[in-house]
Image (cartoon, grey):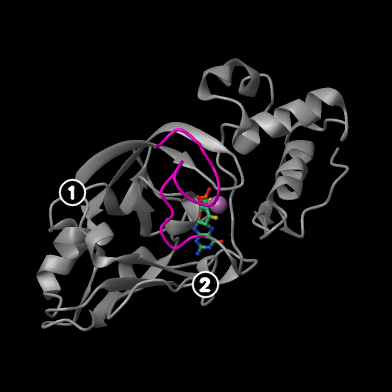
Amino acid sequence: MSTVSEPCTLGSVRTGGHRPLARRAALAGLLASAGGLALGSPVQRFVARYLGGDVGPDAGWLRSLVPGTDRFRIYSVAGFIPAVEPARWRLAVGGMVERPRSFSLAELGSLGPVDLVADFQCVTGWRVPEVRWRGVPLARLLDAVSPRDGVGGVEFTSADGVYATSLTLEQAGRDDVLLAWELEGDVLSAPHGSPVRLLVGPMYGYKSLKWLSSVEVVPRAGRGYWEERGYDADAWVGRSNGRDDRPT
Ligand SMILES: Nc1nc2c(c(=O)[nH]1)N[C@H]1C(S)=C(S)[C@@H](COP(=O)(O)O)O[C@H]1N2
Ligand SMILES: [Mo]
């Protein structure tokens, strides 16, 4: 079926889809595996160019002809899906805060759940329209621990032991940045980051860290798995990474 192999594939888990300085190649790989299309055909080149952002958003009819381009890919740079038992999950929240503490799922839920609907877009080109999430705004969690005066960033780690990302404190305070435990009305599945993932509505998918395990307030933002491999720290959809996608 697929003529182009991904850098790393584990069962149905597709990993390594992001390749700095080779994003179009990665996209071609995704398309080849999604559609079984012959590489190098004029149609494929056009589709790849379109999905790469060179053609306007009104060309959506074309995407509908390519199977699978509007569905989630499951990514794990660690190469496996951590099994985190929801009943035992604790979120450690610390760093430069007045009241460091940890949160159980129930404690997180008591902060006041909200729903958010937003397109989800990966920087490699795929986009899932109007995804519905439920969770609590990260801002409420930060309020509960009181970041110290003068701090500027928040760092996040994953139970996979490898992935990480960060936001500025200002970005972290937006109401479209959630700690999410529901996706489309269902409890988050393990591949999608169970029990809790970050969901950064206005930014590329690499900010939406899965299997969230800790939140740390730091002097300055900027660190992260993909951020350290050439992707922008400020990952606004359509205004970063040299892309011009429609904002989410
Ligand atoms: N822990 C972890 N979180 C992650 C990733 C990852 O590899 N590991 N990939 C990121 C990227 S690049 C994207 S596009 C989204 C994809 O979310 P999904 O796997 O639920 O489709 O997860 C993000 N969060
Ligand atoms: Mo991504």
Q: Does the image show residue 122? A: yes
Q: Mark 2 and ligand 1: say if the CB distance to the nearest ligand atom is below 8 Å.
A: yes
Marker disc for residue 46:
none
Mark 2 highlights which residue?
160
The quadrant of the picture occupied by the N terminus is top right
- Which residue is located at x 76 percent, y 48 percent? 25
Q: Is residue 209 above or below residue 214?
A: above
Question: Amino acid under label 2?
Answer: Asp
Residue that carries the numbered disc 1 in the rendered image: 113
In terms of image quadrants, where is residue 144?
A: bottom left
Does residue 68 appear in the picture of this structure?
Answer: no
10 Å neighbourhood of mark 1: few (<14), some, or many (≥20)? some
Q: Is residue 2 magenta?
A: no
Which corner quadrant holds the C terminus?
A: top left
The span picked out in magenta is 232-247
User: Which three-letter amino acid code belongs to the residue tagged 1?
Assistant: Pro
Horizontal side, residue 25 vs residue 114: left or right: right
The dominant secondary structure in magenta is: loop
Going by the image, does 220 lie left or right of 27? left
Q: How far separated are the C-alphas under marks 1 and 2?
A: 25 Å
Above/below status of 242 relative to 86: above
Q: Nearer the viewer, residue 10 or 200?
A: 200
Residue 66 spot, x, y in % from top left: 69, 25
Callout 1: helix, strand or loop? loop
Please state the horizontal and vertical placement of residue 81, each as a whole percent of the image: 57, 63
